[in-house]
Image: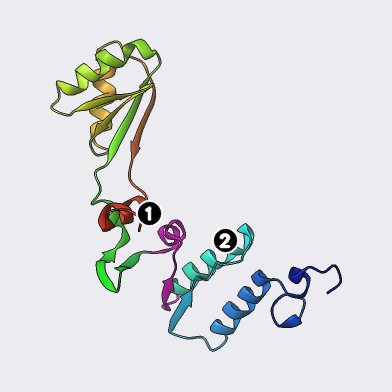
Amino acid sequence: MPNGLDTEVGEGGLGLSGGQYQRIGIARAFYTQPKLLILDEPTNGLDPAGIQEVRDLLEKLTKEGVTVFVSSHLLSELEMISKYLVMLRKGEVIFAGPIEELLYRNKPTIIAKPSSINSLPYLAELINKTGHQAIIESDHVRVDADESFAVTLNKIAFEGGIVLAQLTPVRASLEETFFELTGGAE
């Protein structure tokens, strides 16, 4: 070991990094041009450019008709590359289907931030009159509603003389949805 660093030698003593070994493993998996590809943590050890290359490659393969199964603990990564998802917990299937279906199960919210913090109570009052419940949080109002309510919210704020500095529909991430489904981290 030149500097006494294990990373200089890499796996197998060939002087390759973990990311380089990951790329070799992925390349070997594609060598036979499979119709079904099963990958476990395919982006593990890769730099951001390598991660994007793997994402692009997986998308290209699925467009060519290859079925790709990816096993990963990185839910944010799965959210970016998956169309369908099977979610397991303690060996039990807790969800199987399109990822969008799972994400849309969570209550969407809208964040409305007026240009003046003094407008918060009045904005909340206007929202409450629509039948939705407004919750004041520091410098904004949060309302549990889907994206279509944003148009109504913008209109009632305008008609009430409130200028909105921010109006943002928010959906839960796959990770947040997982924790909601499973009751939190264990």
Give percent across and percent down for residue 183. 27, 54
- Pick the residue in front: 60 or 1: 1
Residue on which the image places disc 1:
175
Alpha carbon separation for disc pair 2 and 1: 20 Å
**Residue displayed at 24% across by 36% down:** 148
Query: Dot 2: what SS?
Result: helix
Residue extent of the magenta highlight: 64-82
Query: Within the image, what quadrant is residue 162 found in?
Result: top left
Left or right of 98, for residue 173? right
Left or right of 123, for residue 55? right
Left or right of 76, for residue 131? left
- Image quadrant holding the C terminus, namely bottom left
Please check the rendered image and state whether residue 46 is part of the magenta-colored stretch, yes or no. no
Query: Within the image, what quadrant is residue 66 found in?
Result: bottom left
Give percent across and percent down for residue 134. 23, 26
176 over 128 or under it: above or below: below
88 over 147 or under it: above or below: below
Q: Tell me which amino acid carries mark 1.
A: Glu
Q: Tell me which amino acid carries mark 2.
A: Gln
Residue 177 appears in the picture as rendered:
yes
154 over 17 or under it: above or below: above
Please check the rendered image and state whether residue 69 is part of the magenta-colored stretch, yes or no. yes
35 over 57 or under it: above or below: below
- Pick the residue in front: 132 or 8: 8
Q: Nearer the viewer, mark 2 or mark 1?
A: 1
Q: Earlier in the sequence, mark 2 or mark 1?
A: 2
In the image, farthest residue toward the bottom: 32
Query: Within the image, what quadrant is residue 21 found in?
Result: bottom right
Label 1 Cα crowd, 10 Å radius (few <14 / some 14-19 / many 20+): some
**Residue displayed at 44% across by 58% down:** 80
Residue on which the image places disc 2:
52
